[in-house]
Amino acid sequence: MGDFLLTMPWAVVLILLPLVGAIVCFLWPKNVNQLGLVTLAGVFLSVVGLGAWLLENGVYHHAVGGWNAPLGIHLYADGLSLVMLGITALVGLFVSVYATAYFDRVQSEQFWPLWLFLLTALNALFLSADMFNLYVTLELLGLSAVALVALAGGKAALNGAMRYLLASLLGSLLFLFGVALLYHTYGSLDLAILSEQIEASPTVWMALGLISAGLLLKTALFPLHFWLPPAHASAFSPISALLSALVVKASFYLLLRLWLELFWPISGSVAGLLGILGVMAILWGSLQALRQTRVKMLVAYSTVAQIGYLFLAFPLAMGAGVTAWNAVMYLAISHALAKAAMFMAAGNLLRFGGHDRIADLDQLAQRLPLTVAAFALAGVSLIGLPPSGGFIGKWLLLEAALMQGRWDLAVVIVLGGVLAAMYLFKVLGYAFTEASTPSKVTAVPVRMEWAALLLASGAILLGFLAPLILPLLAIGTPFDAFSSAQEVMS
Amino acid sequence: MNWNDWLPLLLIACSLVPGLIIFGLAEQRVRLRTTLNLSGSVINLLLVAWMLWGVYHGQHFETRLPLLPGLDLVLRAGPLSLLFVTLSAVLWLLTTIYAIGYLEGSPHRSRFFGFFSLCVSATIGVAMSGNLITFLLFYELLTLATYPLIVHRGTEVARHAGKIYLRYTLIGGGLLMFATVWLYTLTGSLEFTPQGFLHALGDEHRPALVMIFILFIAGFGVKAALIPLHGWLPLAMIAPAPVSALLHAVAVVKAGAFGIVRVVYDVFGINFATDLGVTAPLAWLAAFTILYASMRALYQDDLKRRLAFSTISQVSYITLGIAIAGPIAAIGGVVHLVHQGLMKITLFFCAGNLAETLGIHKISEMDGVGQRMPWTMAAFTIGVFGMIGAPPTAGFITKWYLGMGALEAGQSWVIWVLAGSSLLNAAYFLPILHRVWFRKPPKHWPEEHDFGRQETSWMLLLPPIITAFLALGAGLVAAAAFSPLAWAKLIAEREFY
Amino acid sequence: MSIAVLYALVGIGLFCLGVYALMIHAHLLRKILALNIMGSGVFMVLLALAGRTEIMPDPVPAAMVITGIVVAVSATAFALALMLKISAVTGRAELNDEEEK
């Protein structure tokens, strides 16, 4: 058994399994729910297998079909990839369970192939190690995500999907242009080869600018966030959960990876700019969230704000090193769990009462204690209150900021938490009222309530799991490239 | 496996686990819920007794779990922790009994008792925290667990009070987190150490440390209701009586005061803090709070609001005792943690009884109520005398030590504050007693409920009588080995010598 | 000026033109066309890269362009389908920001 665990090419399985699943779901839609769930379970186990492999052997390399770089496709996994794959599988599993109850027959036949394609793209993205392959996964990711948004039909969803599609395609093209420039300079697309050769030159700067702009657009960092709230808020709730929790993180992961491996030696000086945008995102997103009158819009703007936190690490990493990256990865995975749970909870409210107007929530919230609990627990993590994953992330980030006297960022980190509390309690306050409940409600399947609650509890549990997760993240020292750069600079 | 390593965690589980189960119970499972609540608190009490005995005989109870690289979740049972834990455990049991009686037949009881247990878990966690990050963790948990209790009634007023409460406490929590992380980046340690762990830092860090101290006081001052951070407390009176009782006597307000004690003693160290020059302003702030809040209390007609302002004033005695920075005053401050708890919870229980039995909310409605509810009002009277500081009640012990300590530390101005406060206390409490005992009762009470031969339900009557008895006892047997005063002396000894 | 440089410059020009058109036109068809033109610009640049060595063309950029075209075709098809749906629902092939009442 142990041998089996260590000899399976898990990375390949992680890409092929959901791909095959998607095709099967598309061709034989009869038992689509069961097929989908089995696929997800398989993906989950494969991540565990890959994790066991990584713990045993360090980083994972695989040249697909035996073709090596520069021509072949190269798969690569370290701690950073593993954590992203893990959170994707975990959130994916719960969202899938939720989705089996959420969608009707026809909708689930449309949902499953697209979602499994999305999963394929995500897994491939986390495992790819060359620039062009990353472009392809990015494009596949964008297209399946847009299609998922459009599933909801209706004016708002179609508009949101279109806006998302245009932004996504523009982002991919910017990225591709940047890749072309890199190839022009170095004649290679392999990350490892590029990272050895890269040095500052006008072309590389331009490539950096184009690639970063494309990925920032896809990550929806302020002020490029315009497409996110309409798309995330108008999609079906399980899809909003997937988009906010995972898809946005994927392009962030890519940006992080490229900066760490390729651009860090030259880009340290512009990291401050990302930090400023991050600060603006936190403040702007929070203020917009405060103004919303619909739950899903509020949650979507909260995503805009939370993305801002992820970018605070860039200016901080210069002096604080691994602490800042750990902080940001911890925030990213906590946000993935919490935000997925929150969108699912919002979906439950929507299903129950047929609307998500905040002002009329009091009539609904009391009848769905599990859902409200899920929303509240997820909120605790988003605010960054202990004990939760969000707290650990913010603690580390604050530590990184104060260590080097970045008071401005430290104040924003704390302030962002207070603002988050303000907009989230705007919703939660309605759980405790005397309002009578309306007679016309639709029952919410138990599965949907529990899926949300369990994911939210996961975000809380993360508060105690740092001693387990931080060492995982350190496999293959993904953040080392930059610490050596740091030594050079100091 | 060593049991002593897990006992502190077990203590928290005693209230946490029943609380979580209760959340899942249907509204009408009264018997199961009551059993869970009571067995939880009784086991809790037994464990506390066992640990008291153990610590007295030099045993060590500490749970340590890794939380972050270099930082652990530490729960430790030292003398100071146990003082607070004992108070919480005893008052939890009594308040639970009271709450069961008080809320009989009202809606959302599962939710109420769930959060109630969570609140107690958080308080016990605050008490036993062995370092600042653990403290912060439970302190914030306490904020979250009390919010649903404050808004429990769900009226517009209650929700407004909840909003204000959150606004104050979450901003306070933010300041605390900021200060804690800042401190951590300077020292690399957050472990509570007798006499502090900062004196080894170089002089160049002094301005930063003063800032950190201010941030800590601002953060804890919110819950300890130091003026001008007290705004949430009178509003929070809208909560059901058992909540107010617990909030004022043990949980929230005390957690704030306890935080100040911890920071001054176990983080900065009293000598170092005095050296930094931060204790004197803290003493002035506390003194001002004592006098100003008493003054405000004079003008309240709503009984619970008057008690609320009285709390603001009384809790600052603790801060004052710490800030005087002398061993004897410290005894007064620390012991008041317990004394104020016992006395104030008595008063709130009684106020709740009046509201529940006769529908009395205002002081102007209390004429002659002593004839209708003699037992309740007898307990109330003992509480009042304690607040004023009349011998032989517990309040007298506090004031005696505070006064002596101030003289010893050469700060005689404190005597005037204490005297002024006692006068004001008398001025806002004695007229109530006069009404209660010496005026004629009206023909009809605002909203009378019938409880048969007794003046009210025994579940409502028993807790205040016991706490009044304890408040009296803490004063009478102050010299005994296990009295709160003896423990306070033990704590002060450890800090000063 | 060699052919390769000319290709590259034209490619950059097309890309910029596409970005501009994407920004200013409201009609979705024009936006989709703009994206296609941007894509063509990038492909031109890649082809210029393939052709810059005298001896024999570099196969990697050519492979990238082929893959890129496949992606672009499917993305365009998808975008057009979405546009048709939007115009079926709203009667106009434009993005509109009004909230659904």
Image (spheres, coloured by chain):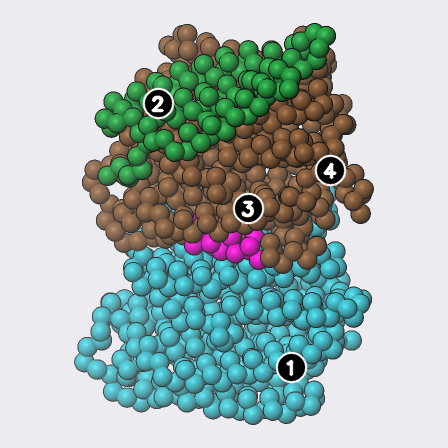
Chain colours: A brown, B cyan, C green
Residue picked out by circle 1: B280
Residue picked out by circle 4: A265
- Residue B306: x %, y % from top left: 39, 78
Eye-nearest disc, 4 or 3: 4
Which chain hosts label 2? Answer: C
SS type, badge 3: helix
Residue at position x 57%, y 62% in the image? B175
Q: Residues within 10 Å of mark 3 (few under 14, many from 20)?
A: many
Residue picked out by circle 3: A278
Q: Residues within 10 Å of mark 1 (few under 14, many from 20)?
A: some
Residue B331, above or below A41: below
- The amino acid at mark 3 is Gly
Residue A170, above or below B230: above
- Residue B420: x %, y % from top left: 51, 91
Q: Nearer the viewer, residue B41 or A340?
A: A340
Q: Nearer the viewer, residue A197 or A390?
A: A197
Eye-nearest disc, 1 or 4: 4
Q: What is the CA distance from the residue labelled 4 to the residue labelled 2?
A: 42 Å
Question: Toward which corner of the image does residue B381 lie, by quadrant?
Answer: bottom left
